[in-house]
Amino acid sequence: MAFSRHPTDYLGKEYRRLVSENLNWQLRVLESASEPICVVDGKEVLMLCANNYLNLATHPKVVEAMIKTSENYGAGAGSDRSISGNMVVHEELDRRLAEFKNAPASLTFQTGFMANEGVIPQLGGRGDLFISDELNHGSIIDGVRLCHADRAIFEHKDAEDLNRVMEEAEKHDPPYKHIWIFTDGVFSMDGDLAPLTEIAKIAKEHGAGVYVDDAHGEGVLGKGGRGIVSHFSLGRDEVHVEMGTFSKAFGVVGGHITGGEDLRNFAYNTSRSWLLSGAVPPGVAAACTAAIDVLETEPQHVEKVLHNRNHMLDGLNDAGFDTGNTETPIIPVMCGKSKTSKDLAEYLWNDGIFVLPIFYPMVAREKARIRVQLCTKHTTDQLNRALESFKEGGRKLRII
Ligand code: PMP
């Protein structure tokens, strides 16, 4: 029988469509360490789009821990943690993180994405309900999709709408056995915060679990950078799973969940990404532990990143930019169309400033933006230079 099927020609077509609609991703190459002044694609630029909020990626104690531990324990763990790759350094990291978070237990993963994708689908099944904020991170969305539980969405940060969803859910017959609410703590494209106190209150009234992804809150929010649960002074009986990552403020790579002992035991016995994938190298685990040490002993990093963030936000707002509702070192500079965000990023790039345009499908079509991210080591001079460039580019493109 004749057919016109081709195994791969749609890949190129799809890519060309993305290019023609200005929706393609342009990869840049970082040729130096991730520092405020770095070399990208052969050019020296001011970095304003790293998740390395506290500059711990290059902190001497963190780097030294990685080198020394690699020398002693090797470059790799040799196996999944579930088999023979569970080294003392992994156990130490789990323990130190739980201590840092004032929680009974933590379980660390290879990445934050793998933590969400591994744990979330195990929390429910048929007869259960998973409720998500409409702007949750893709790794939560994927985790929820891997589960047979019913799904519902509430409007972004809208506790009233969450209440509506809950009331609706209570009419379900038979009653849902388990209900979980999933939310980012800090929303990664907007830098705004989940109303976690209200969410926890609603959850309590309905016997629901609360799962917060604090990837961008750790190291920035809460006492000494302990994250959003600390920021809102919530208890472990109010937020049942605090998920996070070592790839942002901690400056390394890895993910975790933090909560009760039962959560840890349940998670490492059921999460497929944990059970069926290699352990992070011992040097990585030790570097993450060293990053926790730094957070505990050098509070100045958290203070400085918040100072820098306030300086940049005030400058952008004074210039007339719309920066949404950010409360963190993530500042969205709203541009409207994806083309405008790309043009502004290009303008800044030509002026020696590296920022990222964020556009559909990462955000809604008409809500393209530049996402600015501040770090501890930015100087006021560097930020003022960036502000001048933003102003000129913004005027040229009629954004302000
Ligand atoms: N959750 C959120 C909100 C994130 O922004 C990210 C990283 N982009 C992740 C989870 C995944 O973390 P990781 O980089 O450790 O995989």
Image (tube, rainbow, N blue to C red):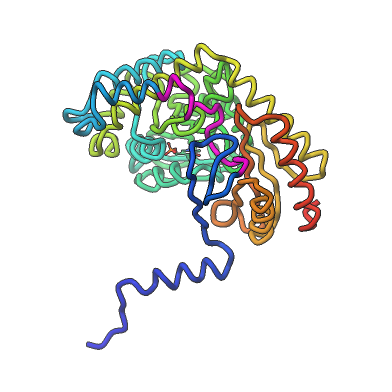
Residue at the location (52% across, 33% down)?
52
- The reply, left or right, for residue 317 in relation to residue 103 is right
Q: Is residue 112 above or below residue 107?
A: below
Picture coordinates of residue 58, whole percent (x, y): 48, 28
* Of residues 121 and 59, the one drawn nearer to the viewer in this rendering: 59
The N terminus, quarter of image: bottom left
Which region is colored magenta?
45-63
Image quadrant in which you'd find residue 118 = top left
Please say whether residue 155 is visible from this viewpoint.
Answer: no
Residue at the location (65% across, 56% down)?
346
Please say whether residue 262 is visible from this viewpoint.
Answer: yes
Residue at the location (69% across, 59% down)?
340
* Of residues 58 and 279, the one drawn nearer to the viewer in this rendering: 58
Picture coordinates of residue 278, whole percent (x, y): 25, 36
Q: Magenta stretch: residue 304 in it? A: no
Picture coordinates of residue 209, whole percent (x, y): 45, 29
Q: Magenta stretch: residue 59 in it? A: yes
Image quadrant in which you'd find residue 134 = top right
- The reply, left or right, for residue 153 in relation to residue 378 is left
> How many numbered marks, from 0 up?
0
Picture coordinates of residue 344, whole percent (x, y): 69, 54
Q: Residue furthest bottom?
A: 2
Q: Is residue 304 above or below residue 48?
A: above
Q: Residue furthest left?
A: 84
Residue at the location (61% across, 44% down)?
45
* Of residues 125 and 57, the one drawn nearer to the viewer in this rendering: 57
